[in-house]
Amino acid sequence: MEFLGSVNIFDHRPQDTVKADVGDALGVELAADGSGFYEELPAYVARVLGLEIALLRIGSPGEDGAQFQVLVRGIAETSGQDEVDVSRHLADLLSAHGLRCAVDAP
């Protein structure tokens, strides 16, 4: 499954705090993931409009670099149209809410 968007967030605050800010920025409520899709990474997800938005902790507190990642993937059947990368739009929304982030390079 290809991701439709990927943004790194640089933040040393607790995941619950970042989760609340990301949810506010994107207009969704993120809940703990129980699917196992993200395996061993602590993840929160929201499902809306046939998409899944996930917030993953990808670094430990105190580590340099990206601490979190926001991923968007399609979870609904589509008509086979070309997929659209929403990474730049995600980064703009998150930045507008004061989160320091960057589009994840492929």
Image (cartoon, grey):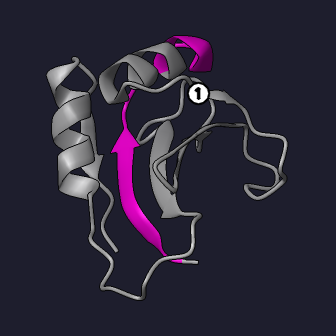
- Is the C terminus in the top left, top right, bottom left or bottom right quadrant? bottom left
Residue 86 within the magenta-colored segment of the rendering: no
Q: Is residue 93 among what the camera can see?
A: yes
Camera-nearest residue between 81 and 58: 81
- The part of the image, by quadrant, that contains residue 103 is bottom left
Camera-nearest residue between 56 and 51: 51
Point 76% across, 39% down: residue: 33
Residue 10 within the magenta-colored segment of the rendering: yes
Point 50% across, 54% down: residue: 51
Percent x, y of residue 20: 49, 14
Q: Along the horizontal axis of the image, is 95 left or right of 65?
A: left
Q: Looking at the image, is 5 positioned above or below residue 11?
A: below
- Is the N terminus in the top left, top right, bottom left or bottom right quadrant? bottom right
The region drawn magenta spans 2-18
Residue wearing tag 1? 30
Q: Along the horizontal axis of the image, is 24 left or right of 38?
A: left
Q: Looking at the image, is 96 positioned above or below residue 90?
A: above
Q: Looking at the image, is 17 positioned above or below residue 101?
A: above
Point 30% across, 85% down: residue: 82
Percent x, y of residue 14: 58, 14
Q: Amino acid at mark 1?
A: Leu
Camera-nearest residue between 60 and 51: 51
Camera-nearest residue between 55 and 40: 55
**Disc count in the image?**
1
Point 51% across, 56% down: residue: 50
Percent x, y of residue 88: 18, 53
